[in-house]
Image (spheres, rainbow, N blue to C red):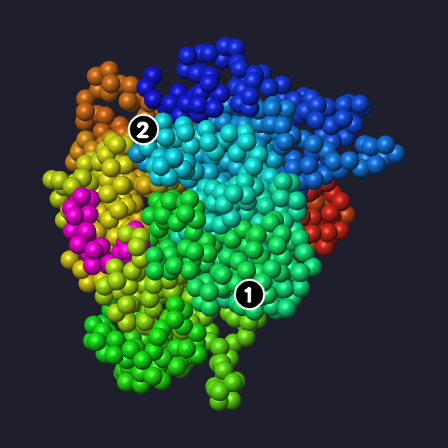
């Protein structure tokens, strides 16, 4: 039987979770009942109808078991079931996310019913979170569910009869099929066709036995995440093969883990487009937040340092940790203080908490207010800024259940704020979170947050390589540019010796720096240099950034340089394409302030506009603002012309590493020479950080080998041969699924390099070969409904454009679109090439299938079948076969022309006119022509290809038809309406 998705992956999942081996037909073996474990039940034994989402018999038993009031009166269970059914039905009106949020409120025990004495409201438990042994955990497969159509997900996990997890298994042995195919089935097909099944959903997962990824409802595929397990040696395990997938599955899908994710790690939040979305944690957020909670509950170690690489979701980690800490009964209503170090970060963190509707969150505007809250013993989540602790009094509050979460902790060395926090809150827990590694020289940071018990000083670590591997962030590429405008390092060192640069320069400090190094400032801002750089930015942006729909960010030496860059950029782009974001000072002249000052609310508007893919704004120009705490996934390229170091540099360049559709890397174009020595620019103790940046020089060196690997699949194929013959030869060289997949893998790697390097001159040498490979790739790509999502995903903008410009349908799809006319038939008859004869035969069959319902074509099809039968039995000669085949082809062309003419004669308008004349009576108004014209005009506006197959399309057309008939007071004539609609459905 071999290895299939059923016997290899789906059955493996079931065996891993429940101990049942379906390949050995062990379904009936006795199942263990002790402990918290999934029990396998075949779908036919669940006792539910194909239209039912819940296994109501199991849910009723759980309601009776978990609720004393329902146990006393079991009939009350029906009232709860009725409420839950209403939410399931409402999904079509309110949408899947809102229905899921409402159902979650029931599952987490937040809903009450008047079941107590004197109709007192009591909480209703669907699931027991305290004693997990009191719940039923059922695992089933091939779960048939019908809504608008029938779907059969591979694996479904149910708690107390409620389906909480949907899983899809794919084949492990086909290279082009991956977990993405399974995720696509869940997200694009099942969630739309049977949304009720996902109303109680905690998460969904997909695997092909090599990798495991999971996601929440309505989560785009690029944001699905892997689940990892931290081993005892703190090395995060790699997913390799079924054994590793088994460990990850067992860990992620353990009942305790799922219920923890549901109760403490599921957020319903509002995105920038004001849409409700659901967020569940990536494993590093889950693990980091739980480590904080665990350490606080144990109470032995009072601090911890967490390094999770820039862009991997620290803001959400803090939300999850704060929420779980507030809910922990052992902590007796703690105070959680979230401290940030800059106003822009304050906005981002507050925004994350507020959008997620986290309860009891307060932001403080002043030191006094923060101190008052602490002195008054406020028990909430308080968001404040770290500098507000500067003047804090010692022993403001000595409670032990105060927990501080300090964002970007390594900057707390300024003014020794760590010690002041410790003095003000002597018994509090202090956790530092950072996106950049802490240099061993940051003694204060390790003193304040790093615990001796933690290896390397970190309680939880998620490195750059981890985030790239898990696709939580994107790789970064950098391009050193224009050596003649680079800064002379010796001159730079001299200019800076009088000025001690802080970790993050403010706008004012940057200006001060340039005053103290006037020569350097003059060089950096010389008009000729700025002109050169801006011209290069415009060319680079138009060639490499704009075609993909991404945006750019320009970082200049100081505030006045921002204005200089803006004025120069306006020569290449419309004025609204760029905006300057700087602050102004009291010393600035009035005109400068009036023109360039940006306050907090204006900055927020600019950021929102920048994040809007449809807006005119393509660039933001900054010097110190928006280098940290600024989340703009659409930003793909940073044009850097400023000296940045260490933490600030790493944080700044990571503005470009956020995930965004079709974005494969972040790009830093370096005009300053910051990365002349990348290792020195990122001088941290962690080796991995030195490899954050990929030099494009390195990518150039990989191109020749990548091109050779892609061409290797076509050895012996003449690439100068055009048309049908050339394409057929190329396709014959990769004529099996295995060969096609191997070619796709090599071509996709080459395409990624090509997109990264374009429009580099090195590509000119390979342009012809790449164009040829791209055409072949396009011609053998599987049909979109049968696509393997990893190897055959959409190509980058440069490659797509190249294909569009250089592929002509007739040339690439000659095999598919064989032209059948008199000349072709004559040619085949006079030159009986076996390939062309076979092609003619194939084409005729295709055409007969297309006109399947037509009697004339049915006869022609029978003639062809008879002819093939004779040829196979050797009853006719080859030349007779060709003669008869050509005769059938001629008759086919003739029949097609006749059919076309007939359809033209019976146009939609003519058909409707016919109808009205046929039904006309003395009472019918004599405006038939006008009626027909009206209907024709309205229906043509609202109909669209395939409208007959959609409920919305049919409803829209029916509404328009009624409207047209109403004008002539004919809307109540049902026979007329039905007949008219019948005609419209057939002819439009």
Q: Residue at x 36, y 80 (%)?
A: 513
Q: Which mark is residue 173?
A: 2
Q: Residue furthest top?
A: 29
669 or 362, nearer to the observer: 362
Residue under circle 1?
389
Main secondary structure found in the magenta portion:
helix
Please tell me whether residue 126 belongs to the stretch shown in magenta: no
Query: Which quadrant is the N terminus positioned in?
Result: top left
Q: Quadrant location of the C terminus?
A: top right
SS category of the residue bearing label 2: loop
Q: Is residue 125 left or right of residue 692?
A: right
Crowding at dot 2, Cα within 10 Å, few <14 / some 14-19 / many 20+, comes out as some
x then y, percent, for residue 46: 60, 19
Where residue 520 sits in the image (x, y, percent)? 28, 81
Q: Secondary structure at mark 1?
A: helix
Residue range of the region highlighted in magenta in the rendering = 688-711
């Amino acid at each position: 039987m071999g290895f299939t998705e059923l016997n290899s992956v789906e059955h493996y999942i079931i065996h891993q979770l429940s101990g049942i081996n379906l390949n050995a037909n062990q379904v009936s073996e006795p199942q263990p009942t002790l402990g918290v474990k999934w029990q396998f039940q075949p779908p036919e034994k669940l006792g539910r109808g194909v239209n039912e989402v819940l296994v109501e018999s199991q849910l009723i038993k759980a309601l009776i078991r978990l609720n004393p009031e329902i146990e006393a009166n079991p009939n009350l269970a029906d009232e709860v079931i009725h409420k839950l059914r209403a939410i399931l039905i409402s999904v079509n009106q309110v949408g899947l996310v809102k229905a899921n949020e409402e159902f979650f409120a029931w599952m987490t025990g937040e809903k009450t019913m008047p079941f107590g004495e004197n109709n007192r409201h009591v909480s209703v438990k669907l699931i027991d979170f305290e004693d997990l042994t009191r719940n039923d955990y059922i695992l089933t497969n091939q779960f048939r569910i019908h809504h608008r159509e029938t779907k059969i997900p591979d694996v479904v996990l149910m708690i107390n009869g409620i389906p909480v997890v949907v899983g899809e298994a794919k084949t492990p042995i086909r290279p082009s099929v991956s977990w993405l195919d399974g995720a696509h089935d869940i997200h694009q097909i099942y969630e739309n066709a049977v949304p009720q099944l996902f109303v109680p959903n905690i998460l969904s997962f997909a695997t092909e036995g090599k990798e495991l990824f999971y996601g929440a409802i309505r989560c785009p595929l690029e944001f699905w995440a892997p689940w990892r397990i931290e081993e005892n040696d703190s090395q995060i395990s790699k997913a390799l093969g079924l054994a590793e997938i088994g460990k990850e599955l067992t860990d992620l899908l353990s009942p305790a883990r799922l219920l923890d994710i549901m109760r403490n790690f599921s957020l319903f939040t509002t995105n920038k487009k004001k849409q409700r979305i659901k967020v569940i944690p990536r494993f590093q957020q889950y693990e980091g937040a739980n480590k904080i909670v665990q350490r606080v509950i144990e109470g032995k170690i009072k601090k911890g340092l967490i390094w999770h690489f820039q862009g991997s979701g620290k803001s959400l980690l803090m939300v999850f940790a704060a929420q779980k800490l507030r809910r922990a009964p052992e902590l007796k209503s703690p105070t959680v203080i979230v401290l940030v170090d800059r106003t822009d970060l304050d906005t981002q963190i507050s925004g994350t908490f507020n959008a997620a509707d986290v309860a009891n969150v307060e932001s403080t505007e002043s030191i006094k207010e923060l101190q008052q809250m602490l002195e008054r013993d406020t028990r909430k989540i308080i968001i404040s800024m770290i500098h507000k602790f500067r003047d804090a009094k010692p022993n403001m509050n000595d409670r032990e259940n105060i927990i501080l979460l300090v964002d970007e902790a390594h900057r707390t060395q300024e003014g020794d704020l760590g010690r002041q926090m410790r003095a003000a809150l002597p018994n509090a827990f202090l956790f530092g979170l950072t996106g950049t590694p802490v240099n061993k020289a940051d003694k204060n940071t390790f003193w304040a947050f790093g615990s001796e018990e933690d290896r390397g000083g970190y309680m939880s670590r998620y490195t750059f390589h981890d985030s790239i591997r898990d696709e939580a962030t994107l790789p970064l590429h950098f391009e050193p540019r224009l050596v003649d405008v680079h800064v002379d390092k010796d001159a730079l060192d001299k200019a800076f010796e009088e000025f001690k640069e802080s970790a993050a320069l403010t706008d004012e400090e940057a200006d001060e720096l340039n005053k103290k190094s006037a020569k350097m400032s003059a060089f950096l801002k010389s008009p000729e240099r700025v002109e050169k750089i801006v011209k290069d930015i415009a060319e680079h942006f138009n060639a490499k950034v704009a075609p993909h729909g991404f945006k750019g960010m320009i970082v200049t030496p100081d505030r006045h340089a921002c204005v200089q860059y803006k004025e120069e950029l306006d020569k290449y782009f419309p004025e609204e394409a760029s905006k300057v974001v700087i602050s102004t000072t009291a010393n600035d002249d009035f005109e400068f302030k009036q023109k360039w000052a940006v306050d907090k609310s204006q900055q927020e508007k600019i950021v929102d506009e920048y994040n809007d893919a449809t807006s005119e704004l393509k660039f933001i120009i900054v010097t110190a603002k928006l280098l940290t705490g600024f989340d703009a996934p659409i930003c793909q390229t940073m044009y850097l012309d400023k000296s940045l170091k260490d933490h600030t540099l790493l944080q700044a360049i990571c503005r470009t590493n956020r995930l965004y559709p079709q974005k494969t890397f972040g790009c830093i174009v370096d005009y300053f020479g910051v990365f002349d020595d990348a290792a020195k620019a990122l001088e941290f103790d962690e080796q991995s950080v030195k490899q954050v940046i990929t030099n494009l020089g390195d990518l150039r060196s990989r191109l020749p080998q990548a091109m050779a690997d892609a061409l290797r699949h076509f050895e012996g194929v003449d690439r100068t041969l055009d048309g049908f013959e050339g394409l057929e030869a190329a396709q014959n060289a990769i004529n099996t699924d295995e060969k096609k997949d191997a070619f796709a893998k090599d071509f996709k790697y080459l395409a990624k390099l090509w997109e990264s390097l374009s429009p580099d001159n090195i590509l000119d040498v390979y342009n012809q070969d790449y164009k040829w490979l791209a055409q072949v790739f396009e011609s053998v790509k599987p049909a979109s409904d049968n696509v393997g999502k990893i190897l055959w995903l959409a190509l980058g903008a440069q490659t797509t454009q190249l294909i569009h410009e250089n592929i002509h349908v007739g040339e690439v799809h000659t095999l598919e679109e064989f032209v059948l006319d008199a000349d072709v038939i004559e040619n085949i008859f006079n030159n009986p090439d076996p390939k062309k004869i076979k092609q003619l035969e194939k084409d005729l069959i295709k055409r007969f299938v297309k006109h399947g319902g037509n009697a004339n074509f049915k006869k022609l099809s029978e003639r062809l079948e008879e002819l093939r039968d004779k040829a196979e039995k050797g009853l006719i000669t080859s030349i007779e076969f060709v003669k008869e085949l050509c005769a059938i082809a001629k008759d086919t062309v003739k029949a097609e022309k006749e059919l076309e003419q007939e359809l033209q004669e019976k146009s939609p308008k003519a058909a409707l006119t016919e109808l009205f004349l046929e039904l006309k009576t003395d009472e019918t108004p004599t405006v038939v022509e006008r009626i027909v014209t009206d209907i024709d005009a309205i229906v043509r506006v609202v109909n669209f290809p395939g409208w007959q197959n959609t409920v919305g399309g049919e409803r829209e057309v029916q509404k328009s038809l009624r409207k047209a008939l109403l004008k002539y007071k004919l809307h109540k004539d049902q026979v007329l309406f039905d007949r008219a609609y019948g005609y419209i459905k057939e002819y439009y």
